[in-house]
Image (cartoon, helix red, strand yellow):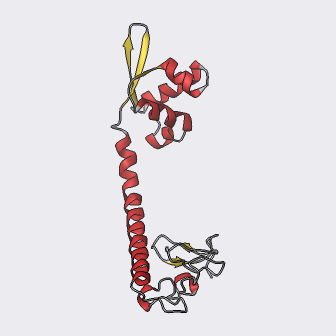
Amino acid sequence: MASTFAVLADPQRRWILDVLRDGERPVNDLVDGLSVSQPTVSKHLKVLREAGLVEVRRDAQRRLYRLRPGPLAEVDAWLAPYRRMWEDSLDALERRLDAVGRADASGEADGSGQVAGSEQAGGSGKAGGSGQVGGSGQAGESGRVDRSGRLGGTDRVDRSGQVGGEADGMSR
């Protein structure tokens, strides 16, 4: 029997599961939605059934398929650490943007556009390599952070929520 991950690798099978998430469906509904032949849909349903992701019920001459979400728990368990990683990264980014917004709102940015030391981040200790907030509020090619906290130029926010590096993943 194929693993749940191998079964879910096929986009047509994922589409079938998406449709069945809304409730029981006959094969012909799935054939019409996928725009492929009935034997092709039947092959996909057989793979999904053998993996335990769907079950079939006979209603006179029709076969009705429905989702069995139990095996998807394996996928959910595998995704859990990645979900936590992204939540942590997004929380760090949110704190960073809140700090930049507080500094801007409290007037901690001086006339030159420099942000107070507590607002600096990244490998060099400065946001975007310059630690500057654009005077016009616009992000430029220098990698400055505008007043809304958006980055310009080629800078990016990495997984830790820090600003720096090139968009293509190369470091400075």
Front in this rendered view, residue 22 or 131: 131
Quadrant (top left, top right, bottom left, bottom right) of the N terminus? top left
Tell me: residue 162, above or below residue 126. Answer: above
> Is 73 situated left or right of 127 in this image?
left
> Is 102 situated left or right of 43 in this image?
left
**Does any portion of residue 104 appear in the rendered image?**
yes
Q: Position of residue 71 (x, y in %)?
A: 36, 38
Residue drawn at the location 63% of the way across and 74% of the way down: 154
Front in this rendered view, residue 115 or 39: 115
Residue drawn at the location 51% of the way across and 34% of the way down: 15
Q: In which quarter of the view is residue 106 placed?
A: bottom left
Quadrant (top left, top right, bottom left, bottom right) of the C terminus? bottom right
Front in this rendered view, residue 41 or 87: 87
Q: Position of residue 35 (x, y in %)?
A: 61, 25
Residue drawn at the location 58% of the way across and 24% of the way down: 40
Q: Position of residue 14 (x, y in %)?
A: 50, 37
Q: Position of residue 160 (x, y in %)?
A: 45, 73
